[in-house]
Amino acid sequence: MPRHATPTRPFGSVLTAMVTPFTADGAVDLGSAVQLARHLVALGHDGLVLNGTTGEAPTTHAPEKAELVAAVVEAVGDDAWVLAGAGSNDTAHAVRMAEQAAEAGAHGLLVVSPYYSRPSQEGVRRHVTAVADATPLPVMLYDVPGRTGLRFAPHTIDALAEHDRVVAMKDASGDPYAAAKAIERTGLAWYSGDDSALLTLLAHGAVGIVSVTGHVAGRQLVDVIRAFDAGNHVEALRIFRSIMPAIDALNGAGFQAVAAKAALQALGVLPERSVRLRLVPATDDELAQIRDGLLAAGLLDVAVR
């Protein structure tokens, strides 16, 4: 297991929701995935989340997901947490995803609320419990109502926090006050699931971030959290402000996988910015705008090759 964990930070402090690299013809590029994972860990990441939204999980298939987890765990699993998405609106499918991730060597699971069908809160609780019961892996919940159409209700979070393997929450709900109350009630480790909300959630009791911008600004995110932990909030804000152009470039249009792959190509980390439909790759004009954001954040010259 990785070294970067404490009781209050079970998955460390900085994780990136990693893209799944594809070749020009759309096949999963395991070689580039391994290269990217090593690159991110070299930038100071405590962990990586695979097969999530930014990893284009809806369009990758079970063998591809398992092969990706196995390859990344082999490459960086001694040095970083490797969490795997087990998200579906079909509970049986989510359970199989969890089991396959565990068999492939994942260290933990990311479990999103069931999307689209909008079940009752009791349905949400039972769904997550079934996934958490399926393996011995620790679980990070994921609350992202902008994508799922459904929030975890406070009483559902409280109930799930009683499960031995539910240890953390990735919060992209946009409700820091509710987060502060939930942290106080449950003791779950809270991670910002929205790059722009990092400082706000740290101020409300969060311990880290699962980031998209971490693809290009991992070191800076580490430094933000270290400065905040040290009580140097002015420095934390200064560093955070310095990377805001990159946050906007990778998140502003809402197509994070597209933008992150384009940014990594601009930095020379990935050879391709290919995605799978329903997504379409960044155009040359969009790539130029992303490069401008990286340049404004001072990031174009910091890629680890």
Image (tube, rainbow, N blue to C red):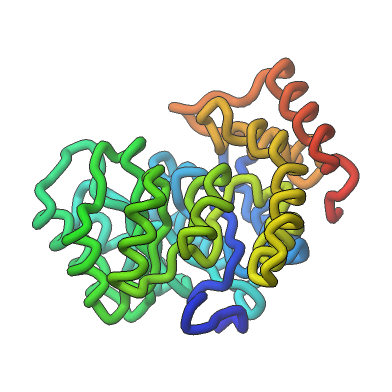
Quarter of the picture containing the N terminus is bottom right
Seen from the viewer's position, the closer of residues 266 and 221 is 221
Where does the image place residue 23, in percent across and percent down from the top left? 65, 39
Q: Is residue 35 visible?
A: no
Say if residue 285 shows up in the picture: yes
Task: Give the side of residue 188 with respect to residue 96, left or right.
Answer: right
Of residues 26 and 119, which is closer to you in this image? 119
For the C terminus, which image quadrant?
bottom right
Q: Position of residue 297 (x, y in %)?
A: 80, 39
Q: As drawn, is 80 to the left or to the right of 264?
A: left
- The residue shown at (35%, 37%) is 147
Which residue is at the front of the view, 254 or 27? 254
- Going 25% across and 42% down the picture, which residue do you hit? 115
Toward which corner of the image does residue 170 lie, by quadrant? bottom left
Q: Is residue 217 left or right of residue 302?
A: left
Give coordinates of residue 165: x percent, y percent: 31, 77
Q: Residue furthest right?
A: 301
Seen at 55% across and 58% down, the residue is 209
